[in-house]
Image: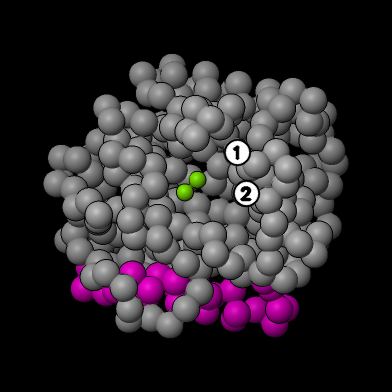
Amino acid sequence: MIQIKTPDEIALMREAGLITQRALAAMRQAVAPGISTGELDEIAEASIRSEGAVPSFLGYHGFTGTICASINDEVVHGIPSRTRKLREGDVISLDCGAIFEGWHGDSAITLGVGEIRPEHQDLIDVTERSLWAGLAAAVAGGRLTDISAAVEASVRSHPRAYGIVDHYGGHGIGTEMHQDPHLLNHGRPGRGPKLVPGLALAVEPMVTLGGPGTRELADGWTVVTTDGSYAAHWEHTVAITEDGPWVTTAEDGGYARLAELGVKVAQRA
Ligand code: MG
Ligand code: MG
């Protein structure tokens, strides 16, 4: 079922989004060679709880972390661990969610650890740009797969043949982290549910330096590329409003990046 939120409910999702964003910012500050993904997890949990919110991943189908920490060929759902230390040159994706007064925020970033190879930085940048292309298509009057098509077109606009991870994608979000509809990162536009004010979506492109295929490790969580190529993952939660997309997990609500892309969007607190 697709959940349509009232403006007051979207305002609570904005609070959850900002709490999620600040947890990611705290981890971003701490990322360096030698820190473990378990320590990053503790930083995120402390940040979220200090604001009266609850980590949404912790306990989700038995997941043991506040964050997913996915390194290099790991795409998503890496389990944080005190024994998994970051090394110079790693590419790490940090995915995090918070629940505030029953409402969810969900967001992910991918960062280089110390100095990384230029092709890895390009992968990170291409994936982030495709996220914003998708968010820019989250406008009332459109259809769900307008977002999918915008993500794909953005990735394909680069001369290098990047892989767009198949099967995994974004999702509706509200009083649960994962709601209908599922949002693929590729496909033809103009299909799927109508984009209406009050619909909130997590948009989350996953892009690789190789092919689109993935497999799950024996830990039952970690998703890696089948060809061993590096992957990047970026995610924001966006609410569709009468005044344009409201990126609840971006500090400025997405205003600057969306305005740059020519999207009519309200400047909000
Ligand atoms: Mg996420
Ligand atoms: Mg998500």
17 shown above or below 75: above
Left or right side of 75 for 102: left
187 shown above or below 1: below
User: Which kind of residue does numbered mark 1 sit on?
Assistant: Cys
Q: Is residue 141 visible?
A: yes
Label 1 to label 2: alpha-carbon separation: 7 Å
Answer with the quarter of the image where residue 201 lies. Answer: bottom left
What SS does tag 2 mark? strand
Q: Is residue 264 visible?
A: no
Who comes first in sequence, dot 1 or dot 2?
1
Quadrant of the frame with the N terminus: bottom left
Residue 242 locus on image (x, y percent): 17, 61
Left or right side of 188 for 94: right
Color scheme of the displayed model = one colour
Residue 90 locus on image (x, y percent): 80, 46
Does mark 1 have its CB less than 8 Å from ligand 1? Answer: yes
What SS does tag 1 mark? strand
In this orientation, which residue lies closer to the viewer: 229 or 254? 229
Q: Which residue: 19% across, 52% down?
A: 4
Residue 228 lies within the magenta run: no
Q: Which residue: 67% across, 31% down?
A: 80
Residue 2 locus on image (x, y percent): 25, 55
Q: Which residue is mark 2?
A: 76
Which label sits on residue 108?
Answer: none
In this orientation, which residue lies closer to the viewer: 200 or 136? 200
Tell me, yes or no, whether the two marked residues, 1 and 2, touch with CB atoms within 8 Å. yes
Residue 155 lies within the magenta run: yes
Q: Which residue: 49% across, 35% down?
A: 61
User: Which kind of residue does numbered mark 2 sit on?
Assistant: Val
Q: Which residues are magenta?
A: 140-163
Q: Which residue is mark 1?
A: 68
